Image (cartoon, helix red, strand yellow):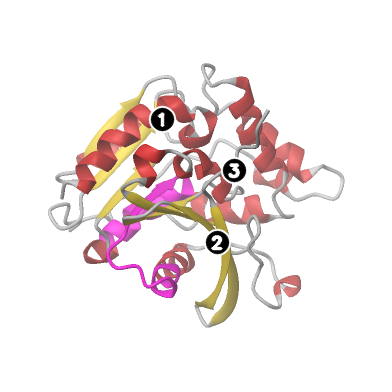
Amino acid sequence: MSAALEPIVGRYVSFDIAGRRCRVYFEEAGEGIPLVCLHTAGADGRQYRHMMCDPDITSRYRVIALDLPWHGKSYPPEGWQDEEYRLSTDLYVETVMAFCRALALVRPALIGCSIGGRIVLQLAHLHSRDFRALIGVEAADHQAPWYDTSWLHRGDVHGGEVCAALVSGLVAPQSPAVHRHETLWQYMQGGPGVFRGDLHFYRVDSDLRGRLDGIRTDLCPLYLLTGEYDFSCTPEDTLRTAASIPGAQVTIMRELGHFPMSENPEQFRGYVLPVLDAIARQ
């Protein structure tokens, strides 16, 4: 059996986020339109590895998946040991914009899932002119919490296993076992308290209901893709959100859950490729 060398290249970039120096890891593959990829809460950029290995995407797009600070191979900022990690809306927006500036990306496209999908809406609201297009996967302006975050950082509980158990039901039943377990493995590897810190943003600091007026989809197309099996961000949540954004384009994806790009990449491919085709034609 011959070795299979993937086209993905990983690098670090150091830059300031909200006045603090951060060393951020990212992976990329392909050439063309920059496509920045934002992972889900408590995970990292590996969720996009299938897109980075798809020549139908990388022949036209420079796919760039970063690990947010505190996640994956990225480091927390200096002094992290003296604070509790809590992601906020303002910090998340600043992180994305600072990363794009650090790599000198000019009007990139951007795709984000879950918390990444939520911040896509805020980016559309505040920074439409800075992006070629925005894709919110499992995105809505608000969801009622269905989980107890007190279990996510306790000395008597294995944090990684609890994180994976919490999200396991969000994977669609049709997702292949190999991709299901790969997705859950990423959740088992998160740093202590990181998933809970992300969910602070998701459940406490990012209620965007009534705050998304003025989004210019004529300047920056907005695509919303949600899996039919997602009970965290339900199709109804996404449809309700889209109804308040003139020009937003919504697709409810069959046989997919909350992590479509990693839980069932082949099924997701059938939905994301037409969106990428449309963006490339702009």
Judged by depth in the image, the label closer to the viewer, 2 or 3, is: 3
Task: Compare marks 3 and 1 and give the one earlier in the sequence.
Answer: 3
Return the x and y of residue 125 as percentages of the image width and height.
27, 59
Q: Is residue 205 left or right of residue 220?
A: right
Residue at the image point whose x is 62% and y is 21% from the top: 177
Image marks 1 and 2: residues in contact by CB distance under 8 Å: no
Query: Which amino acid type is marked by label 2?
Result: Leu
Answer with the quarter of the image where residue 273 lies. Answer: top left
Q: Could you tell me how far apart the alpha carbons at marks 1 and 2 are, in whole angstroms?
A: 28 Å
- Label 2 sits on a secondary structure element that is loop
Q: Which residue is mark 1?
A: 268
User: Which range of residues does the magenta coloring cover?
Assistant: 98-125
Return the x and y of residue 247 as percentages of the image width and height.
15, 44
Query: Which amino acid type is marked by label 1?
Result: Phe
Return the x and y of residue 195 as percentages of the image width and height.
64, 50
Query: Which amino acid type is marked by label 3?
Result: Leu
Q: Is residue 250 above or below residue 21?
A: above
Residue at the image point whose x is 87% and y is 45% from the top: 156
Judged by depth in the image, the label closer to the viewer, 1 or 2, is: 1
Q: Is residue 23 above or below residue 8?
A: below
Label 3: few (<14), some (14–19) or many (≥20) C-alpha neighbours in 10 Å: few
Task: Compare marks 1 and 2 and give the one earlier in the sequence.
Answer: 2
Does residue 129 appear in the picture of this structure? yes
Q: Which residue is mark 3?
A: 5
Q: Is residue 106 left or right of residue 245?
A: right
Q: Which residue is mark 2?
A: 87
- Label 1 sits on a secondary structure element that is helix
Judged by depth in the image, the label closer to the viewer, 3 or 1, is: 3
Q: Residue furthest right?
A: 156
As rendered, which of 36 and 16 lies closer to the eye? 36
Return the x and y of residue 233 as percentages of the image width and height.
43, 35
